[in-house]
Image (cartoon, rainbow, N blue to C red):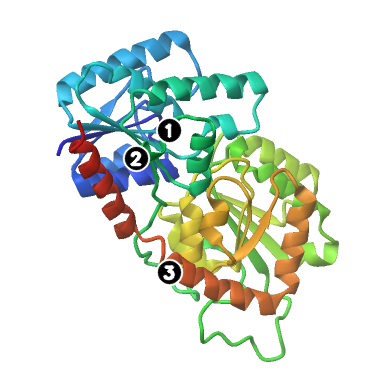
Amino acid sequence: MRILYVITQADGGGAQKYVLSLAKRFNGAIAAGTESGKLFDDAHKAGLDTFRLEHLKRNLNPWHDLLAMWEIRQLIDLYRPDIIHLNSTKAGILGSFASIGKNIKVIFTAHGFVFNEPLPFPVRMFYLAAEKVASDFRDMIIAVSDRDRQSALANKLISPEKITTIHNGIPAIDFLPCADAPKALGLPIPHSDHSDTFVPPAGGFGSEYKFIFATIANFYKTKGLDVLVEAVAMLDKEVRDRCTFVMIGEGTERKKLEDRIQKLGLADIFKLLGNIPDASRYLKAFDAFILPSRKEGFPYTLLEALQAGLPIITTDVGGNSEAIGDAGILIKTEDSRALADAICQMVNGRDDLAGYSQKAKTRSAEFTEERMLKETEKVYEKVAGSK
């Protein structure tokens, strides 16, 4: 079975991890709109074919969008796949139209729908209409969360038999030991090593201990990192002085975040470490994980935090609630006050932390890469065998 994976961007992110995982298992080729990026780097290391789609860009541009459809049609003729597996909104819509008349099967994985994002009403309606038309040319939609599946059905995107939920999954992570991870990042000692044998130091936690929160995310507006900064500013000084907030990642919002952190006098509280290769390996350096997103699909970073046994604070968007279950605290989006209260609850509730940590480890067993790959293979077989 010959599979072509198409995604809008090749930079680091959950959708890119998903594409790489599938392409490696099924020996597929990957096409993306960026000239370089972590996805292409990792694909080359794995010996996979990659193709750049010069005109496939994230922002709307009628001229480039038409040319991108033409590029995808040419690539279909060149690579001659049995299945084209589309990922991300732009690639999903343009790729569906580009496949018309090509006698191939079309699968689209929805890593969250743009029409559910907090955008102006006309913009959301435009994307909803585009998804409805594009779905007429899809053989199957894979939703990474039940919430997205229900949203697709409620908006009549596709018939129920042509959409299925497959939660993302990750392989076992080779974590750095709790004693080594903080040193490698230049961080203070965390409260807990999240192991069953952890014993607090005699006499309690001294001033050298900090409660260390981690966030791993691209610095995009959709990740809600600005909400986290405002929440930390709301904390009582006594709580704030006991905490360190570490952000790992890069993106267009970094300068704005740095300026706001400086203006609020929080430069000693936040540590922005930039991109770190295999950042998930360092998760044992932290006490808890925060992801205050405005929009999500089914975040890999939450699955990585679960596997590390980290209690989680995250927003109730996309598949976040399906991922963490009762292994943390869910809050509303755009609510800095609720996030500040959740942070206080974590810092002051050590008894709760042990329970959250154990539930996180138990829950992570549901989200393995092997399970995801096997369920996706069944979809490929079903679609390939359909008329």
Determine crowd level at label 3: few under 14, some 14-19, many 20+ residues with C-alpha closer than 10 A: some
Residue 130 coordinates in the image, percent (x, y): 47, 20
Residue bearing mark 3: 176
In percent of the image, x 43 and y 8: which residue is there?
Answer: 63
Q: What amino acid does circle 1 point to?
A: Ser
Examine the rendered structure and indicate whether residue 24 appears above or below residue 365: above
Determine crowd level at label 2: few under 14, some 14-19, many 20+ residues with C-alpha closer than 10 A: many
C-alpha distance separating marks 1 and 2 = 14 Å
Quadrant in the rendering for residue 268? bottom right
Residue bearing mark 1: 88
Judge from the rendering whether residue 360 lies leftward or rightward of residue 82; answer left or right: right
C-alpha distance separating marks 3 and 1 = 32 Å
C-alpha distance separating marks 3 and 2 = 24 Å
In percent of the image, x 50 and y 38: which residue is there?
Answer: 112
Number of dots carrying numbers:
3
Q: Earlier in the sequence, mark 3 or mark 1?
A: 1
- 134, 16: nearer the viewer: 134
Q: Nearer the viewer, mark 1 or mark 2?
A: 1
Under tag 1, what secondary structure?
A: loop
Judge from the rendering whether residue 145 lies leftward or rightward of residue 313; answer left or right: left
Q: What amino acid does circle 2 point to?
A: Leu
In percent of the image, x 69 and y 45: which residue is there?
Answer: 333
The disc at residue 39 is 2
Please indicate, yes or no, whether residue 308 appears anywhere in the rendered image. no
Q: What amino acid does circle 3 point to?
A: Leu
Determine crowd level at label 1: few under 14, some 14-19, many 20+ residues with C-alpha closer than 10 A: many
Examine the rendered structure and indicate whether residue 181 appears above or below residue 214: below
Please indicate, yes or no, whether residue 324 appears anywhere in the rendered image. yes
Quadrant in the rendering for residue 356? bottom right
Q: Earlier in the sequence, mark 3 or mark 2?
A: 2
Judge from the rendering whether residue 169 lies leftward or rightward of residue 337; answer left or right: left
